[in-house]
Amino acid sequence: MVGAGRFALDRWTGLWPILLLALALRVTWALLVPVHPISDAATYDMFARNIAAGRGYVFNDGSPTVYWPVGPSALYGVFYALFGPSGWVVAVVNIVMGCGIVAGIYRIGLQRFDARVAALAALIAAVWPVWIQFVTMPSSELSFALFMVLAFAAFGEQRLPRWVRTLLSTALLVIAAFMRPTIVPLILLLPLLGGSLRQPLRTAGNVVLALVLAALLFAPWMERNRALFGEPVLVSANFGANLWMGNNPQSHGRYMALPAVETKNEVTRDAHFKALAVTFIRENPGEFLRLCVKRIAISFDRETIGIVWNARALSPAVQWAGKLVSTAYWLAVLAMAIVGVALWLLQNPARLFDPLVVAPAMFAAVALIVVGQDRYHMPMMPFIALFAAYAIVRLAFRPAKRAAVA
């Protein structure tokens, strides 16, 4: 922990140079690489344009959807409505969010570690290639990471009363859930695991407060989905489809196109694929375990999605070099983060249940069970940056401490 005065000093001497570097790198990328959305990025762009035009969250033919989370399209749609649907709007919004992620990581680092770890973690995030590459695409990754780190930062702000921190962090987690619903369990787990064992009633009260607020915030969207699809879907109706992609007789662990089904109702279709996947897992436990290992390898052995989704704007040579640099950076930071987690847990094994450990483990479980893609490790990256920085600081300053003692 650091005091308010120390934070004020570090904010001017530690954070701002890193933020300026993050800004410069992202602006440079935006100036060199035009926005040409493909895959999910093109889908978010389409929905955002329809939202901006006042048609709502619908396909171009006017039919409503609940398959993708509405959050990313709604976010870009607001700025499309204000400034027009263009690539520069996407880039500016993403640059702001990218810098916000860096600042949020810095604040969490101050709260949970120290100023050196905070600055180094922010620097790791500032120069992380894939976060820079995502500047030129509409996506869920940047907005999700931003609201997640803001939620953790709000929850750790000791100068605020606990109930205020619970309300702020819960509201931010709900917004993050509308970007990617995999974070929903943290609405319960953050106040529960982040509470004090010495004050069980207070912790229980904050858990109830979080759940009540979340229910109120989710309710309007659930009612919209009930009215349109017959079911009060919490955020989106794609878990069953993604589970099937990773668990069916033809699955190779990666993304698969969904076969045609009779129903056009997205909720009914998702339930259909979920039932098929559950049946496959139950009848083929050995194959399920083999696919789990394969999905983890697919999700963690590289980091190329930022180049792949910008492929239309990059030459083949730049794509090859970009994938190489991105993957090398990712594997190096991941290796240091594993060391950092080990060092942190050795000091206190009870930290295994700390939200800083539980959250990335929860995101890893998604790739383990559902379908493998390197983008599925991106929700873990703020925590990976923090633990990588912690490992570097611990290892770098250990000899100095020994010399001082000698």
Image (cartoon, rainbow, N blue to C red):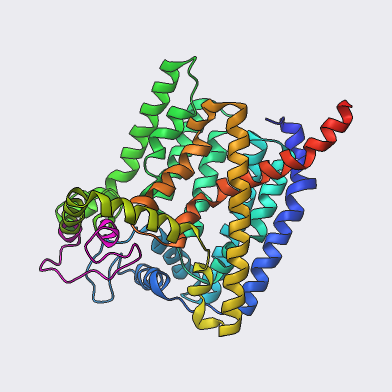
**Residue at left 56%, top 58%?**
97
Whether residue 251 appears in magenta in the rendering, the answer is: yes
**Viewer-closest of 141 and 290:** 290
Prevailing secondary structure class for the magenta stretch in the rendered image = loop
Q: In which quarter of the image is residue 243?
A: bottom left
Q: In which quarter of the image is residue 48?
A: bottom left
For the N terminus, the image quarter is top right
- Whole-percent x and y of residue 4? 71, 32
Q: How many marks?
A: 0
- Whole-percent x and y of residue 84? 47, 74
Q: Quadrant of residue 370?
A: bottom left
For the C terminus, the image quarter is top right
Residue 263 in sight = yes
Whether residue 55 appears in magenta in the rendering, the answer is: no
| For residue 381, above or below residue 25 | above
- Whole-percent x and y of residue 269? 17, 61
**Residue at left 76%, top 32%?**
5
Left or right: 261 as drawn, with respect to 361: left
**Residue at left 43%, top 48%?**
363
Start and end of the magenta stretch? 241-270
**Viewer-closest of 174 and 339:** 339
Residue 140 in sight = no
- Whole-percent x and y of residue 374? 46, 61
**Viewer-closest of 245 and 193:** 245
Left or right: 246 as drawn, with respect to 207: left
**Residue at left 59%, top 37%?**
342
**Viewer-closest of 383 and 101:** 383
- Most distant residue in the front direction: 286
